[in-house]
Image (spheres, rainbow, N blue to C red):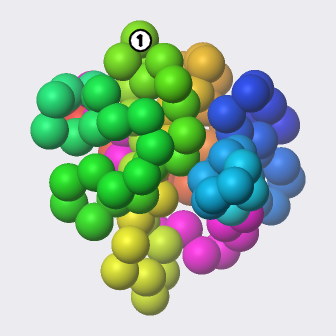
């Protein structure tokens, strides 16, 4: 029950978003700290063309230079944090399945 690609790693107890901080530092979020993960269809206003950094709506997106080709943007709401963590993956269906298998609440939108 572990997913891994060039953008994200899901372990038995946490989500690791690769290349989240500058310069190329990962962000680890324990499952216990995750309130919900929203899965969004990429659009202009939610970060489809943002390569890295702040998107609209308090979301910081991890680096992905081909985000515009991805089929989903994942946005993690972390307990007691104002800023949300955004990322993309190479296989969104596998990530949704793995998060749900780890009892993470996933909401798929539009």
Q: Residue at x 54, y 68 (%)?
A: 34
Q: Residue 2 or 74: which is nearer the viewer?
A: 74
Q: Residue at x 68, y 61 (%)?
A: 27
- Residue 82: say if magenta: no
- Residue 40: say if magenta: yes
- The quarter of the image holding the N terminus is top right
Considering the whole magenta stretch, tell me its main secondary structure: strand
Crowd band around label 1 with a 10 angstrom C-alpha radius: few (<14), some (14–19), many (20+): few
Magenta span of residues: 28-41
- The quarter of the image holding the C terminus is top left
Within the image, what quadrant is residue 98 found in? top right
Is 103 situated above or below 99? Answer: below
Is 83 situated above or below 39? Answer: below
Q: Position of residue 106 (x, y in %)?
A: 44, 47
Is 105 situated above or below 100? Answer: below
Q: Position of residue 66 (x, y in %)?
A: 48, 18
Within the image, what quadrant is residue 63 found in? top right
Q: Position of residue 74 (x, y in %)?
A: 44, 41
Q: Tell me if I can see residue 51 in this picture.
A: yes
Q: Residue at x 34, y 56 (%)?
A: 54
Of all residues shown, which one is farthest toward the bottom? 80
The residue under label 1 is 69
Within the image, what quadrant is residue 26 found in? bottom right
Q: Residue 74 or 100: which is nearer the viewer?
A: 74
- 39 vs 8, left or right, is left
Is 24 situated above or below 14? Answer: above
Q: Secondary structure at mark 1?
A: helix
Q: Tell me if I can see residue 71 in this picture.
A: no
């Amino acid at each position: 029950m572990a997913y891994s690609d060039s953008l994200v790693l899901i372990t038995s107890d946490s989500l690791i978003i690769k290349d989240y901080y500058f310069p190329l530092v990962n962000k680890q979020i324990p499952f216990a700290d995750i309130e919900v993960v929203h899965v969004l269809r990429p659009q202009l206003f939610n970060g489809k063309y943002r390569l890295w950094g702040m998107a609209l709506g308090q979301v910081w997106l991890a680096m992905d230079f081909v985000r515009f080709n991805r089929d989903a943007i994942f946005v993690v709401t972390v307990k007691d944090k104002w800023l949300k963590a955004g990322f993309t993956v190479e296989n969104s269906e596998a990530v949704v399945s793995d998060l749900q298998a780890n009892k993470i609440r996933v909401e798929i939108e539009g």
